[in-house]
Each structure stands twice: as structure tokens, then as C-alpha cells.
Image (cartoon, grey):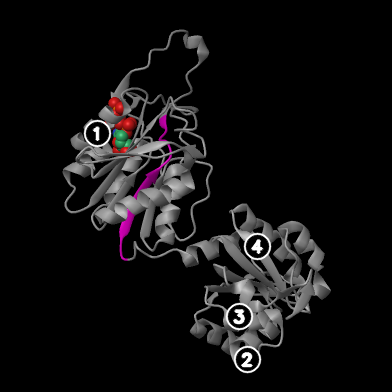
């Protein structure tokens, strides 16, 4: 989404469109605002001009610096038209093909995808005329986001609120993503495991879970049915993803194999603890115990076990290394019977645990290496999925 036209109509939620413009801009898009005449009663065009750096257009034809602005010109480079909030009045005009203001005319001329976010009083939203008009927009090919429920500006409780701008952005991104993982069942593991020593202490590692959660979200956006099996993290489960929270490596092992039978694809991004205390103390260890020797027992290697029962599944592992990263990772790929392994060298800046970026190489079975530059884990997730899609 490089160039977004944001259509704002006359409703109390119009003020939230200012934040929506910022959210799209933060994602790297250029935003051009087009307002209906009624919208400018609720929020000043200057607000949008100041935020976006472009004048917010309200009129069909206007003369500014001797430059004629026509709706077709505005659309020529647009990747997307988002209408938020979309009032009952504008929805009705769009559904019936009116072109009595710049925004409705743009809608008729648009060849890019159109996202519509209805926002209005609960009774208006329920009215058969409005329902029929929204259904008509869906038949036109518009992607319509359901309004939120909550307290409305008119004081009543119900459906009709304009959703949070970040949620509108996420809806848009998900709606526009090609569904190349449709009909694929995927397991993603994420985060650390915790191996208890006593009731208040555990062995673990600094994994944030961000890589696994980013993969789960990206897979879901691309149409997969995803089971995310996660160790303890601070992240919110991605929308539409079945998320199972586990603590220990043993719990992760059980959750993985409970879901392994029907799955086609596995991303094993969890940082599983290789060892657990041989005995878990039932009571808190006291410092008066002076010398405390910890005996460790090895945990099962979950991915190794999956590799033994691989069948026709695609298995993708991760390796965090501190030396001879590529050689060690390729050995792991062969030993665990994987299709791809994503390796990062923990000694490189910006790579590895508990940061939002990663610098990785993707290695395939024949040892070919794709070295990627430093990038955000969200973006990296889609890149890894592109590689997986080629193998599916
Ligand atoms: N893994 C696993 N179960 C374990 C240990 C690791 O499923 N008990 C998986 C990880 O999720 C990862 C891959 O195996 O996808 C590689 O993990 P890593 O810790 O780098 O490798 P290890 O096999 O544990 O080897 P080592 O610690 O000796 O480097």
C-alpha cells in the first residue's frame, strides 16, 4: 500500500480518521484525504492537510495554483481507497451509483480495492435499507469491515462504532493479502519454555516469541488455519489464530503432537530449553542451604521427533548460533529432517532474541544459502512464507 486515498464522510467518528491517516502513514503509505462536504462540518480539512502534507479535497473541481484537480487524476496512482467512517448517506449513494460529490465520484471511477468502514447509530445500522446498501457494496466487490460494539456518540449502547484505527489498518492489510496458504493447516511454535526448579524459580531464555507470533499472523493473513503453540510471552495472540499456551518443553511436546496428525506445515520458532532440572523441588529452595547443586536432565528434541514422523509435511526449523552458524544450521537441518532452516548469528547486531529485527540466512536441504539483510520480524515472516510457499 504505497498510495492510499482516505475518504472521510460526515459522522462524529470523522475525528478518528485523523489517527487512521497517521496509522497508514506510519506503515509507509502516502495518504490523500478526500472529504464529503458533511465531513468538513465535523473535522477541518486543515487537520488532514497538516498531518498528511497534502490538501484534503472536498470539492469536485477546484483551482489551486492554477492546477485543475479531477477525481481521475487522484485515482491514477492510488493502490487503495478506504472510506472511514462511511455514513449511511454515503453508503446509500455508493450503492446506487450517485456521483454528487468528489468522494462518491471517486468511488465510481476507482479500479483499486475499496475498503468501507460503516459507522453510525445502532438503529440506522439495523435498518433494512442500510443493510441492503451494505450488501450491495459487497456485491460491488468492496471489502466491508463490521463496526464495533460499544457506547455510541448518541449515548446508546450497540453496534455502529468506528473500530480502532490500528484495527482498521490490520483489517485492510489482511483483506488485501493474497490467500496463497488457503487450505493449509500450520503449526507454529513460539517463545521460550520454562523449566521449574522450585515453586518460584525456573530455567528459561530471553526469547520474546515475536518471530513465531509474526509467522502465525502472516500465515493467518495468507489464508492458513494456524495453531500457535506458545511458551510464556507478553504478546497478544494474533486474531483468528488458535493459540495454546504452554510452560515446559514437555507440555510443548504434547501440544505439538496433539495437533501434528492433520497438519501440512510446521514452523518451529520456539526456543526450547534443552535441559530441565532432574528434580523439581516441591518447596522453595532457601539460601540457608548454602551450596546448591543443580542436576539437569535432557528434554526431548521436539523437532527431531517431528522429523522422524515427517510424512509429506513441510518442516521449517530455526537455529540461533554463536559460531559457524551456517555449517551448524545445515547439520541441524539434515539431522532433524527439515526442508528449510532459518539461522541467525547471535553475535550480529540486531539479530536474535528479544529484538524486533533479525538478520538471518535461509538454508535449504541442498545447502543453498539465502542471506537476508536486517529487517523487521513482521516483514521477515512474509519473506519466509514466500520461500515456504515455493516448496508447498
Ligand atoms: N528444538 C526442539 N526441541 C528441543 C530443542 C530444539 O524442537 N528440545 C527445535 C527448535 O525449536 C529449533 C531447532 O530445534 O527450531 C533448533 O534449535 P537449537 O536450540 O538451535 O538446536 P539444538 O538442536 O537444541 O542444538 P544446540 O542447542 O546444541 O545448538
Q: Earlier in the sequence, mark 3 or mark 2?
A: 3
Whether residue 259 is visible here, answered yes or no, is: no
Above or below: residue 355 compared with residue 105 = above
Above or below: residue 236 compared with residue 348 = below
| Residue at 31 percent of width and 24 percent of height | 324
Q: Which mark is residue 31?
A: 4
Judge left or right: residue 1 versus residue 190.
right
Q: What whole-number distance in Å separates the C-alpha atoms at marks 4 and 3?
A: 16 Å
| Residue at 50 percent of width and 16 percent of height | 286
Q: Which residue is mark 3?
A: 107
Q: Quadrant of the C terminus?
A: bottom left
Q: Which residue is mark 2?
A: 129
Q: Is mark 3 within 8 Å of ligand 1?
A: no
Above or below: residue 121 compared with residue 31 = below
Q: What whole-number distance in Å separates the C-alpha atoms at marks 4 and 1?
A: 45 Å
Looking at the image, do the residues carrying marks 3 and 2 touch, with CB atoms under 8 Å apart? Answer: no
Q: Quadrant of ligand 1?
A: top left
Q: Earlier in the sequence, mark 4 or mark 2?
A: 4
State which quadrant residue 58 falls in: bottom right
**Residue extending farthest top:** 290
| Residue at 42 percent of width and 48 percent of height | 381
Whether residue 7 is visible here, answered yes or no, is: yes
Q: Residues within 10 Å of mark 2 (few under 14, many from 20)?
A: few
Q: What whole-number distance in Å separates the C-alpha atoms at marks 3 and 2?
A: 20 Å
> Which-is-in-front pick, marks 1 and 2?
1
Q: What whole-number distance in Å separates the C-alpha atoms at marks 1 and 2?
A: 62 Å
> Which-is-in-front pick, marks 4 and 1?
4
Image coordinates of residue 326 in percent, x first then y, are 29, 30
Q: Earlier in the sequence, mark 1 or mark 2?
A: 2
Q: Residues within 10 Å of mark 4 (few under 14, many from 20)?
A: many
Amino acid at each position: 500500500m504505497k498510495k492510499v486515498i482516505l475518504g472521510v464522510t460526515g459522522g462524529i467518528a470523522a475525528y478518528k480518521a485523523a489517527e487512521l491517516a497517521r496509522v497508514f502513514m506510519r506503515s509507509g503509505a502516502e495518504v490523500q484525504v478526500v472529504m464529503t462536504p458533511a465531513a468538513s462540518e465535523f473535522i477541518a480539512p486543515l487537520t488532514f492537510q497538516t498531518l498528511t502534507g497534502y490538501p484534503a479535497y472536498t470539492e469536485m473541481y477546484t483551482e489551486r495554483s492554477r492546477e485543475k484537480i479531477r477525481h481521475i487524476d487522484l485515482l491514477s496512482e492510488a493502490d487503495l481507497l478506504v472510506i472511514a467512517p462511511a455514513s449511511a448517506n454515503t453508503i446509500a449513494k455508493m450503492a446506487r451509483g450517485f456521483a454528487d460529490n468528489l468522494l462518491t465520484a471517486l468511488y465510481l471511477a476507482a479500479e483499486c480495492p475499496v475498503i468501507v468502514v460503516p459507522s453510525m447509530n445502532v438503529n440506522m445500522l439495523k435498518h433494512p435499507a442500510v443493510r441492503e446498501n451494505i450488501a450491495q457494496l459487497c456485491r460491488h466487490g468492496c471489502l466491508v469491515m463490521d463496526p464495533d460494539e460499544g457506547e455510541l456518540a448518541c449515548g446508546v449502547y450497540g453496534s455502529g462504532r468506528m473500530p480502532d484505527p490500528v484495527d482498521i489498518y490490520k483489517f485492510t492489510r489482511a483483506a488485501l493479502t493474497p490467500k496463497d496458504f488457503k487450505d493449509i493447516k500450520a503449526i507454529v511454535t513460539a517463545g521460550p519454555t520454562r523449566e521449574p526448579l522450585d515453586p518460584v524459580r525456573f530455567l528459561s531464555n530471553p526469547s520474546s516469541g515475536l518471530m513465531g507470533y509474526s509467522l502465525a499472523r502472516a500465515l493467518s493473513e495468507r489464508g492458513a488455519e494456524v495453531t500457535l503453540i506458545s511458551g510464556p510471552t507478553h504478546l497478544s495472540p494474533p486474531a483468528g489464530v488458535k493459540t495454546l499456551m504452554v510452560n515446559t518443553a514437555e507440555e510443548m511436546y504434547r501440544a505439538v503432537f496433539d495437533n501434528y496428525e492433520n497438519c501440512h506445515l510446521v514452523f518451529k520458532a520456539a526456543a526450547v530449553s534443552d535441559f530441565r532440572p532432574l528434580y523439581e523441588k516441591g518447596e522453595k529452595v532457601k539460601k540457608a542451604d548454602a551450596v546448591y547443586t543443580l542436576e539437569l536432565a535432557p528434554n526431548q528434541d521436539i523437532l527431531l521427533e517431528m522429523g522422524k514422523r515427517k510424512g509429506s509435511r513441510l518442516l521449517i526449523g530455526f537455529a540461533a548460533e554463536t559460531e559457524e552458524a551456517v555449517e551448524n544450521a545445515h547439520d541441524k537441518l539434515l539431522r532433524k529432517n527439515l526442508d528449510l532452516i532459518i539461522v541467525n548469528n547471535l553475535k550480529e547486531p540486531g539479530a536474535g532474541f528479544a529484538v524486533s529485527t533479525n538478520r538471518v540466512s535461509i538454508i535449504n536441504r541442498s545447502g543453498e544459502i539465502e542471506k537476508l539483510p536486517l529487517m523487521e520480524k513482521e516483514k521477515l515472516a512474509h519473506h519466509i512464507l514466500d520461500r515456504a510457499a515455493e516448496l508447498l
